[in-house]
Amino acid sequence: MGRGLTATVAGRRVAVGNAELMASESVEVGADAISRAQREGEAGRTVVFVSCDGRLAGTVALADGLRDESARVVSDLASMGLVPVLLTGDNERTARAIAAQAGIGEVHAACLPEDKMAYVERIEAAGGKVCMVGDGVNDAPALKLASVGVAMGGVGSDIAADASDIVLVDDGLSGLAHLVALSRRTLRTIRVNLSFSMALNVAATALAAAGTLGPVGGALVHNIGSVLVIVNSALLLKWRAR
């Protein structure tokens, strides 16, 4: 996984993938093909080699179009104190070209599924937290291992969706920044609710011990506190980051 595909088509051995796959198939990749792969890589495209019966048949240049909102989302996440990182199976030149367009500084190219897992393990072993965003089968192990896994529901694979904690149904990246902001706001709301509830209970207990607060008043204070906590939590339903 991560190098390409091989198949038998009409009795002929066909391989489609990167240079490592060609080497494992004993296919000689000429200087012209390598030169073209380098040129395409510098332009942000990935070259896939195609062989038939042990001979190079041609090359195909593939390119992922950068989403319109990608640069803005990366910028928003960085402004929140997060460190965007690109983990990709593309070659170094292609990966850096895409990262430059998106505004991502840290790039790890030519990653196999186990390489992505190793990166997540290394960050979390050092005490960090990883939010992994992916859509393919190659991303599934890292999505499962990360503190939070986010998968693309529309264009992503079912395996990636099953391995994730959150699935973006509309595949919109713009929701990532809101997701982070909402999660932080939710934690803040939980802390406020707990602090308020504890303070109210301590005050009510002290008043009851002093004989100032009777049973009926205690019941009213308890119910009023519960309603205020629910109302404060309900405000999250319509909350939007500025």
Image: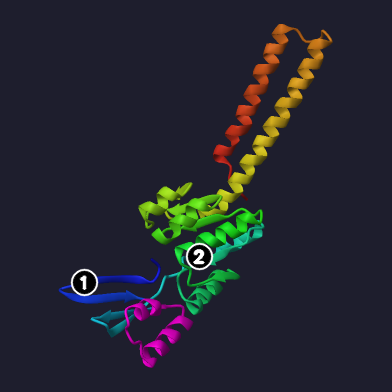
Q: Is residue 60 left or right of residue 121?
A: left
Q: Position of residue 33 (x, y in %)?
A: 37, 88
Distance (Cα) linking label 2 and label 1: 29 Å
Which residue matches tag 2?
Answer: 115
The residue segment tinted magenta is: 18-46
Q: Residue furthest left?
A: 10
Asked whether residue 10 is in view, the answer is yes
The answer to which quarter of the image holds residue 186 is top right
Q: Which SS type dominates the magenta stretch?
A: helix
Which residue matches tag 1?
Answer: 8
Q: Is residue 40 magenta?
A: yes
Location of the N terminus by quadrant is bottom left
Q: Position of residue 131 (x, y in %)?
A: 55, 54
The answer to which quarter of the image holds residue 205 is top right
Q: Position of residue 207 (x, y in %)?
A: 81, 14
Kind of residue at badge 1: Thr
Instruction: Report helix, strand or loop for mark 2.
Output: helix
Q: Position of residue 202 (x, y in %)?
A: 77, 21
Q: Is residue 68 above or below residue 32?
A: above
Q: Is residue 47 left or right of residue 219?
A: left
For image coordinates 32% across by 84% down, the residue present is 27
